[in-house]
Image (cartoon, helix red, strand yellow):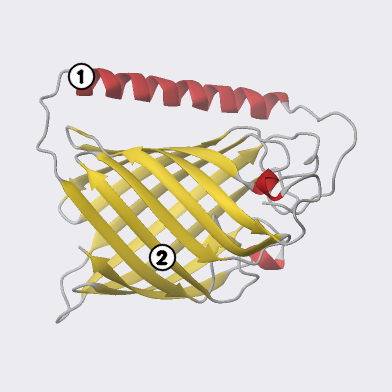
Amino acid sequence: MYGTEAYQGGPRQNGGTRMAKQTLIGMAGAVLFALGSTLTGAHAEERKVGYAVTVTGASDYMFRGISYTDEDVTANLYAEVNYGIAYVALWTSNIDFGALGPWEQDVYFGIRPVTGPVSWDLAAYYYMYGNRDEGAFGSTSDVDYVEFKIGATATPVTNLTVGATVWLQPDQGYAATENISVEGSVSYTLPKLGVFEPTISGLIGHSESGTNDYYTTGYWLGEDSYTYWNAGLKLTADKFFVDLRYWDTTIDDDLADSRFVLSAGVNLLP
């Protein structure tokens, strides 16, 4: 995301982008209202406490098609506690991206309700970063920011899952401009090969950012909008998994060039 110089004047305004963002935010509000209305009349489901812990290593840390480890290896840990449809989760990783590093810690709060054939994931994300220069415009906390997620998946036929996700990012000064990212995904589970369960999947996304006093030529490596995508094969055997994935974007930068990323991990819980 970071990669532009500071701007001392007022922010530029992009009318078309702002209108598109207002439309998407309105759509997101309508979805949340409809979902809330549906859940109000639904009977309470059985509630119980659950846990999930996953450790993963990868040849690169890709965030929406951009390398956040300067094209180097990464190791991360995901831990979740859930109760009924509600969950809280932590995700931590090494990072090397501009002034950011050497670590990233994310906190998620969300719910995963189901309405008919649609499974939802509605959450708030808080991204926290180590900051080697303690902030070009202030303290370390200046690089931490909040983002909201509205995700939905469905399985129209056996083994085929399709999904759509909207990420809403308010303007937070030096940490983040106003931004909307929209993603579509598809995955298909193939017949088992011995102990392995193979799944092929792909994702395409598009991000549109605004401007503020700090970002005037683009929030994403100097770009105010770009498209990213990936496709790959994942092999799962019991609690272990290996994933080989091709990534690319429309950004002309070494950190966003096409590449294959190999990752492997283990689900420690459940």
- The amino acid on which the numbered mark 2 sits, given as a three-letter code, is Leu
Describe residue 155's horizontal placement relative to residue 24 as left or right. left
For mark 1, give the secondary structure.
helix
Q: Residues within 10 Å of mark 1 (few under 14, many from 20)?
A: few
What residue did someone put label 2 on?
A: 77
1 or 2: tag closer to the N-terminus:
1
Q: Is residue 249 above or below residue 30?
A: below
Describe residue 45's horizontal placement relative to residue 125 as left or right. left
At horizontal 90% and vertical 36% (from top left) the residue drawn is 8
Q: Quadrant of residue 236?
A: bottom left
Residue 251: where, in percent of width, then height?
A: 68, 56
At horizontal 32% and vertical 70% (from top left) the residue drawn is 234
For mark 2, give the secondary structure.
strand
What residue did someone put label 1 on?
A: 40
Q: Residues within 10 Å of mark 2 (few under 14, many from 20)?
A: some
Quadrant for the C terminus in the image: bottom left
Q: Quadrant of residue 173?
A: top right
**Residue lying furthest right in this view?**
8
At horizontal 66% and vertical 35% (from top left) the residue drawn is 172
Where residue 96 is drawn, which disc sits there? none
Q: Is residue 134 above or below residue 144?
A: below
